[in-house]
Image (cartoon, helix red, strand yellow):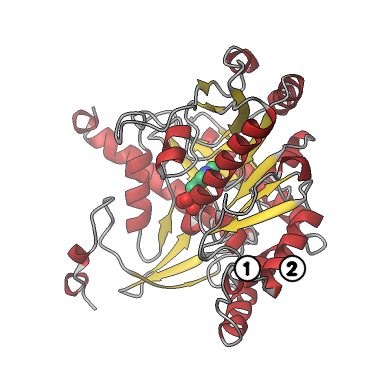
Amino acid sequence: MEFSQYNVNALMYITPRPELVFTEGRGMWMTDHNGKRYLDYLQGWAVNCLGHSPKCIEDAIVAQAGKLLNPSPAFYNENMVKLADLLTQHSCFDRVFFANSGAEANEGAIKLARKWGQKNKNGAFEIITFDHGFHGRTLATMSASGKPGWDTIFAPQVTGFPKADLNDIGSVEKLINEKTVAVMLEPVQGEGGVIPASREFMQALRALTQKHNILLIVDEVQTGMGRTGELFGYQLSGIEPDIMTLGKGIGGGVPLAALLAKEAVSCFVPGDQGGTYNGAPLMTAAGIAVINALTAPGFLDEVKAKAAYLSKALFALSDKFQMEGERGEGLLRALKLGSDIGPRLVEVARDLEPIGLLINSPRPNLLRFMPALNVSYEEIDTLISMLSQVIQQVKDEQAAAPAAQS
Ligand SMILES: *Cc1c(COP(=O)(O)O)cnc(C)c1O
């Protein structure tokens, strides 16, 4: 089918999309309407942690679809119970509430912290969040986010989210007052440009929040579910938060998210929290398949080994083109380009023939990589050789037309 035959204008315009319609995916590869194949280092924005359409998720969903789709959120179902059990067994948390998106899980975390503040801290409600943080696109989570410009687009904001600077404990301490109920952060700022919170900072944050009897909330929508090489990002710093949210990878491609909390903080009472699809068995079936795969013996060791391999290869590429190195945790990594060529690299990579490469530039001077956690070494080598070609092409382009780039 020709692209012009699709009536894409029936969709609300929310982002410029390339003139491609994707029709199939398998593992690290995706195919468009022309049959062209792409090596996919986006994976639905770190969502497909086992790659496109893995057999274990397909089997789980197909089996569940013919069995029970939705008994009602007011009843238990086997999959919601089992997945909550697995998540609590493999983390430091005791209770789970399932949601459909990362933003919704974070809304739940904000509500839970405010409820806890009402019960335990005289109605304290302020949650300290961070510049360049990202927590979702609902009104409250946009207000909690520190994306430049987000404080005004849908004004007025939801109040109560003062902003500190990542990896600067003094900037957090300064904001604490009698209204403070929690500190909330991503263990690695993802949308902000793959900026890890340091181990020392996470430990200092845990000590500071304990000293002031306030909660520590980790938004692990991007860093959770094996992405960093640990099952959860907080495990990198050896601390235990009070609340955690999961999204993206937990569903392996389907809409599933979760809010987890320690027993002492799980203070919702009937009426406080809910949602039509919470814990629906179709999505939680996928979640069970995902966590079983990630916790299989040796899986996370492989993620760590591949992360080290990718990191080394990106450093070598950086050296070759005199760039500024790379950073990240596990298989959430960024190449520091040293100039604002990211958006152009993304286009050229996608348009490569005969196969394209899908990558993302969260900031113009960075490329971000979020492969499937079971990416092969060969697919990492292919990434590097394709990137090398793309960077060379864009550098040549710039050398030929320096004025057009300024
Ligand atoms: C993607 C993301 C969200 C939002 O998740 P949605 O499922 O898009 O609502 C929240 N927090 C972080 C850290 C994310 O990366």
Which circle's residue, 1 or 2, is located before the other in the chain?
A: 2
**Residue beneath disc 2:** 82
Residue under the point 33% across and 29% down: 149
Quarter of the figure with residue 188: top right
**As drawn, which residue projects farthest toward the bottom?**
66
Counting from the top left corner in percent of width and height, residue 323 is at 48, 31
For ligand 1, tell me if the residue under mark 1 lies within 8 Å. Answer: no
Counting from the top left corner in percent of width and height, residue 350 is at 36, 56
**Residue 317 in view, yes or no:** no
**Residue 174 in view, yes or no:** yes
Badge number at residue 284:
1
**Secondary-structure class at tag 2:** helix
In the image, 322 versus 132, the foreground residue is 132
| Label 2 crowd bin: few (<14), some (14–19), many (20+), radius 10 Å | some
Quarter of the figure with residue 397: top left
Left or right: residue 311 compared with residue 385: right
Left or right: residue 363 compared with residue 370: left
Name above or below for residue 389 compared with residue 365.
below
In the image, 390 versus 293, the foreground residue is 293
Between the residue at mark 1 and the residue at mark 2, the CA separation in whole angstroms equals 9 Å
Name above or below for residue 137 compared with residue 69.
above
Question: Disc count in the image?
Answer: 2
Counting from the top left corner in percent of width and height, residue 248 is at 55, 55
Dot 1 and dot 2 residues touching (CB under 8 Å): yes
Residue under the point 52% across and 35% down: 318
Quadrant for the C terminus in the image? top left
In the image, 195 versus 130, the foreground residue is 130
Counting from the top left corner in percent of width and height, residue 159 is at 44, 28
Left or right: residue 215 compared with residue 19: right
User: What's the amino acid at mark 2?
Assistant: Lys
